[in-house]
Structures are given as structure tokens and as C-alpha cells.
Image: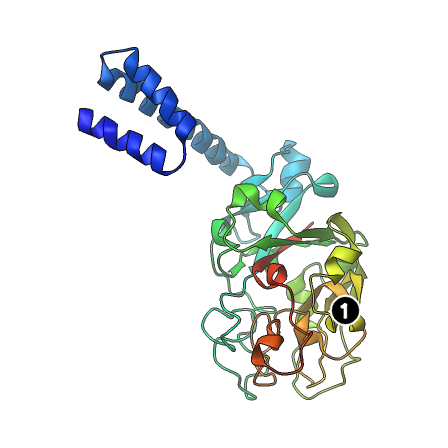
Amino acid sequence: MLSHTLLFLGIFLILGHRSLADVFLQEVNETTDLPEVIAEGTEKLTRTNFEWLRKVSDRSKYIARSCKEILDNYDEREDGIYYLTTTNGMIYQTFCDMNTAGGGWTLVASVHENSVYGRCTVGDRWSSQQGNNPNLPDGDGNWSNRNTFGVVEGATSNDYKNPGYYDIFAADVSLWHIPNNFPVEHWNLAAILRYHTDSNFLRLYGGNLFNLFKQFPVRYNVGTCSSRGPAVPIVYDHGDRESTRYLYGMKSRTEFDPGFITFRPINNEQSAMAICSGVKPRGCNSEHYCIGGGGYFHPDQCGDFPSFDWDRLGREQGWSASKEMTESAVLLFYR
């Protein structure tokens, strides 16, 4: 038993938990019953975890299609993971933001770039995992289909899409830019940007992004870069127009206006992106500051973050997005 005790103490010291180790040593010095000390600590840990698990599990009793319904019907005001039910009775878990701008925001998707070096390869679910193919202009088509993938706790580590994306009827959207791999309990504080719309614009497009993108299908080589979907003003919850501007490349800043979310922009090569998160294009090089899209781009642009790393290719410099933006997932919420 003494060897086990020394092993635990060694782990604490290696991890830098010196204050915790000191406390443990004090308890050991004050008692000759080592098993009792270890058993007490284990009991406290088990009790704490059980209380938390019971709290999360109790949320399954709520019957709601959205976090807004949970907020309104059950007066639940704590951010975290909740259970929702679709119109057809499917139960799933997602994250609810119960505080921003009155709360009631439902996480429905995240766009995560697993590798900017890949070009429409495995993991590019919001563009194409099937290569850069002119015969598949819509790529995987996940902006306008009922596919679901990923888990809510991994939304900053992988692409995520739940049934709420197409099932919830909403009025507005909120976007959070969270550094990759951050755990769910730290999303709010870790965000480099958080903002939302407050104009009820989604009601004009069927109440969700699924229906909005149905109205703006991907058609390669159709239209010009002045063609795009709606550009909606945003309200900042963390960050501002100036911080948004400086998260993108020097040359990109000259051809967009920060303070908007823009849908279905077309670039200079007549390829369609999905969302310009935080900006409204004035120029034609939207692949450097817009995300997602179809399955056919210029060969150096294909992917969920189509050309955020342009400078790395050794060509005209000043277009790459910042490391903070490139290495962050974009989380999409409805309310």
C-alpha cells in the first residue's frame, strides 16, 4: 500500500500539483492509517462526480426541441449539455448557451479544419471529402442535407452536425470561434470571437440554415463574384469589428466589411463558399476569409477553410488568415 501511496504522490508532483501533494503529505504525517486517507479522498471524488452526472442526467426529463424551449418552459439558465427531441421523436444531446443576449441558443453544428494542407480530403465534411471534382459541385452537400456527424463534446476537435440543424425553426444565429480542442466547459471563455444576429432574418429563409442553403444551391461557373446570398449585420458578444478585421490577412482586409455574416458568396473563380463568418465581401477573393462550400474550386483552394493558408504556397503574400482563425472551430447556434 505504501508503494501505491508514493506512486500517487509522484504523479501529483510530475503534473505540477505541488499544493495538492503538500496537503496529501500533511494528512499522511498526521495519521498512521494510510488506507483511511486514500479511501476518504476516493469517496469525495466519487461523490462529486456522481452529483454532476446526476445533474446532467436529470436534464433528460425536459421535453423540448430547442434550448430556447428549455429556457422558456423550465427556466433552466445554466450553460451546458442538454437533451433535445426532434419532431419525429429522436433524442440527442447538444450544448445550450443559456446566457448570451438573453440565452436559449442551441448548438447545431461546428466547422473544424482538420488540416489546411489537405484539399477536399477526409474530414472536409463541410466542402468535399471526395477530392476537387467538377462533377460534384455540391461536394458532400452537408449544408443542405440531413446527414449528421460528430459528438457535441468533440465539436472543437472535429466537424459536428446534429438533427437540430434541419429540425429547429429559428429566427437568428450565433457564431463562436473557439481554438481547436478546447473542452466544452471552457468554450465561452476561450472564444476569440462571439457574435449573433438579432434581425429574425432566418424566418425569411425557412427558419434554419438547411432551408436557407436549399434556396442558394451550389452551381459552379454560374454567376459572378457579386452574386451571393444575404449579408446580415451582427451584434458582438466578444470581440469587435477591428479585432475581426485583424484576424484575416492584410490583403483580405481591403476587400471585406466586418460586422456581418454572409451566406453563399461566389469567388473570382466562380466557386461557391458557404459562410463568411463575421464579414461581408466587397471583393472576389472570398476563399481567404469564408468557410465551407462545394466540391469544386481552384486546385489550391478546396477544403472547409478553402484558402486560409495561401501565403504558405509561396505565391502572392498577404492573403493568409491568422493562426488564431485558422486553428479555431466555428460553432453555429440557433435561437
| 35 horizontally vs 253: left or right | left
Relative to 133, is 176 on the left or the right? right
Task: Judge left or right: residue 83 versus residue 280.
Answer: left
The amino acid sitting under disc 1 is Arg
Q: Which of 206 and 124 is in front in this view?
A: 124
> Relative to the observer, which residue lies in front, 201 or 178?
178
Coordinates of residue 285 in the picture (x, y in percent) = 72, 78
Q: How many marks do you count on the picture?
A: 1
Residue 306 sits above or below residue 159 on the image? below
Image location of residue 232, percent across then percent down? 79, 62
Viewer-closest of 164 and 115: 115
The residue drawn where x is 62% and y is 43% is 189
* 140 on left or right of 290: left
* Coloring scheme used: rainbow
In front here: 283 or 92?
Answer: 283
Residue visible at 35% across and 38% down in the picture: 14
Q: How crowded is mark 1: few (under 14 residues within 10 Å), some or many (20 or more)?
A: many
Quadrant that contains the N terminus? top left
Residue ID for mark 1: 253
- The residue shown at (23%, 13%) is 33
The secondary structure type at the circle numbered 1 is helix
Residue 5 in the image: state x and y as whole percent.
Answer: 24, 26
Report x, y in % for residue 46: 36, 27
Does residue 115 appear in this view?
yes
For the question of whether residue 1 can be seen, the reply is no
**Up-down: is 204 above or below 153?**
below
Quarter of the image for residue 175 reads bottom right
